[in-house]
């Protein structure tokens, strides 16, 4: 199989050399495509070739190094094999869940019990409280959500993360009897004296969830009949007829498995297309024949009693989890990873940490000749960003303003005491001739500090933009590791968060 064959740079380059291309040379797209046509003995798939070429970095003439193109082919081979393996694992997972779903549906055929309202006697409402947005209240420590159903009240755990945009991510289950129950959702905050303060409330209408799908909702809270700018994000799902729900899920699993099998065929064809120019003739023919054979996609047998119901036009249902869609392009080497932004931000934190350490050392040396306490305080403020998670927009803005003021202070100081360099200023410290090098180095370090703090102003501006987004990052320095962006505390608030 093509999964067992892995092309190497040397085998790819040797293949191109048979067409007249040379190592160490750059070629146009048409030249590379023509070489692939010669190696395969037919017209090479232009869609695949175009995707491969787009992964390269051409020069100003639009040419690509032959070695770079070979490396892209190897990476594309790895990507396709990885997608095939992942899709096969997903299919196996879907098969297991399909089999379990069929067993449950078969049991429910004989055991389902409905009340007079046509609702399962063990009907459940599932609510996942995700996050609150824009809490317009400052003097509190924690927040939580309370959900009441016909007088029975259940509350989430205390919030984590951003104080004004707290995260809960907690699932709550409720027993539903008739479908006409009143569901009231309230957002509370708790101060240092353990007092509960109501921020706002809203409600959920069960009538909108008869389709048994997962509903993502953003509820605008109300307090004293006034609409607030505070929102509560949650997901809810009411399973009122388990038999019907499992029948619809069976249909969805079957469709997903069949589509995944089609995706695997597409991946294998693209993989063969990539490997074909560099395969031996006998191996190439065997792989082509294997792909031409029709595939029999067998699904677990299901009970025939509800076969007709599944063939009706039923809406696609969603379980509390979401099935992952396939990528539109099979050969996509440089895929966007959700952690990429966090890694880049961690690098910015690291570089800023190094610059502030340099500023701290320069400030300590300058203290021998001038009171440079402002730079020392700024360095401490930056350390607090990392060590105490003050990755909060207002705090970073204040530190940035102080840094700009420090630059202005250094410029004014140099303009006043520039005569220290020649030793003619009367304010020169009375250290004698032995102190002249220290005084002169103070002026030099002050200039260096201005340059450092100018760069730090840009880094702080980058921090400010990133801190406005809900991101949790990890700052690593040597063997120490600090999570940043979880608490988002502010040293300058009046409620003493860091005390």
Image: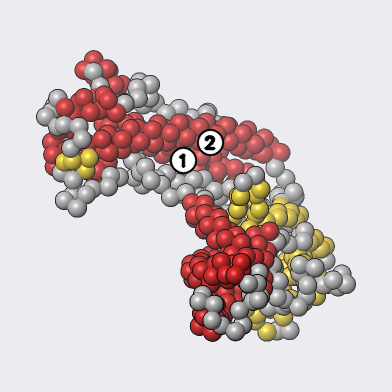
Q: In which quadrant is the C terminus drawn?
A: bottom right
Which coloring applies here?
secondary structure
Residue at image position (49%, 45%) is: 324
The single residue placed furthest to the right in the displayed view is: 193
Where residue 75 sits, quadrant-wise, is top left
Viewer-proximal residue, 150 or 260? 260
Viewer-proximal residue, 68 or 304? 68
Residue at image position (65%, 44%) is: 479
Residue 359's x, y, as percent?
58, 64
How many residues crowd mark 2 within 10 Å: few (<14), some (14–19), many (20+)?
some
Residue contact between numbered discs 1 and 2, judged by CB atoms under 8 Å:
yes
How many residues crowd mark 1 within 10 Å: few (<14), some (14–19), many (20+)?
some
In this figure, which residue is indicated by the disc labeled 1? 256
Compute the Cα span from label 1 to label 2.
Answer: 8 Å
The single residue placed furthest to the front in the displayed view is: 433
In this figure, which residue is indicated by the disc labeled 2? 94
Q: Secondary structure under badge 2? A: helix
Left or right position of 137 against 96:
right
Closer to the chain start, of discs 1 and 2, is 2
Residue 204's x, y, as percent?
67, 67
Q: Secondary structure under badge 1? A: helix
Residue at image position (18%, 37%) is: 25
Residue at image position (60%, 50%) is: 476
């Amino acid at each position: 199989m093509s999964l067992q064959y892995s092309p190497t740079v040397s085998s790819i380059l040797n293949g191109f050399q048979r067409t007249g291309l040379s190592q160490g040379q750059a070629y146009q797209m048409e030249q590379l495509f023509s070489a692939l046509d010669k190696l395969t003995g037919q017209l090479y798939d232009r869609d695949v070739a175009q995707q491969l070429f787009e992964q390269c970095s051409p020069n100003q003439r639009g040419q690509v190094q032959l070695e770079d193109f070979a490396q892209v082919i190897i990476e594309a081979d790895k990507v396709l094999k990885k997608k095939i393996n992942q899709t096969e694992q997903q299919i196996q997972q879907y098969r297991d869940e399909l089999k379990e779903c069929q067993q449950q549906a078969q049991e429910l055929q004989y055991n389902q019990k409905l009340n007079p309202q046509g609702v399962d006697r063990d009907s459940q409402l599932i609510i996942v409280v995700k996050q609150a947005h824009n809490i317009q209240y400052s003097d509190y420590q924690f927040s939580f959500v309370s959900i009441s159903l016909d007088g029975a009240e259940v509350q989430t755990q205390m919030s984590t993360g951003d104080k004004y945009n707290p995260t809960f991510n907690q699932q709550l289950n409720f027993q539903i009897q008739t479908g006409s129950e009143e569901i009231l959702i309230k957002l509370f905050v708790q101060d240092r004296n353990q007092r509960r303060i109501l921020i706002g409330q809203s409600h959920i209408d069960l009538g909108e969830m008869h389709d048994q799908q997962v509903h993502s909702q953003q509820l605008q809270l109300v307090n004293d009949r006034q609409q607030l700018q505070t929102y509560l994000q949650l997901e809810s799902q009411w399973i009122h007829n388990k038999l019907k729900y499992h029948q619809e899920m069976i249909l969805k699993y079957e469709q997903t498995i069949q589509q995944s099998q089609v995706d695997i065929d597409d991946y294998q064809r693209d993989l063969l297309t990539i490997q074909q120019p560099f395969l031996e003739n006998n191996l190439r023919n065997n792989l082509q024949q294997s792909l031409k054979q029709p595939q029999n996609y067998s699904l677990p047998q299901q009970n025939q009693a509800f076969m007709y119901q599944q063939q009706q036009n039923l809406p696609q249902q969603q379980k509390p989890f979401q099935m992952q869609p396939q990528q539109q392009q099979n050969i996509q080497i440089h895929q966007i990873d959700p952690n990429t932004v966090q890694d880049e931000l961690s690098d910015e934190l690291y570089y800023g940490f190094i610059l502030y350490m340099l500023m701290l050392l320069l400030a300590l040396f300058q203290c021998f000749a001038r009171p440079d306490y402002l730079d020392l305080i700024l360095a401490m403020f930056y350390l607090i960003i990392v060590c105490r998670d003050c990755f909060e927009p207002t705090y970073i803005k204040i530190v940035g303003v102080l840094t700009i003021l420090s630059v202005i202070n250094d410029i004014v100081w140099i303009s006043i005491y520039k005569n220290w360099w020649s030793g003619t200023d009367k304010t020169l410290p009375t250290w004698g001739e032995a102190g002249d090098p220290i005084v002169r180095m103070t002026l030099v370090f002050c200039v260096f500090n201005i340059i450092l703090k100018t760069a730090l102003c840009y880094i702080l501006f980058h921090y400010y933009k990133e801190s406005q987004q809900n991101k949790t990052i990890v700052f690593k320095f040597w063997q120490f590791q600090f999570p940043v962006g979880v608490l988002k505390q502010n040293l300058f608030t009046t409620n003493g968060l860091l005390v």
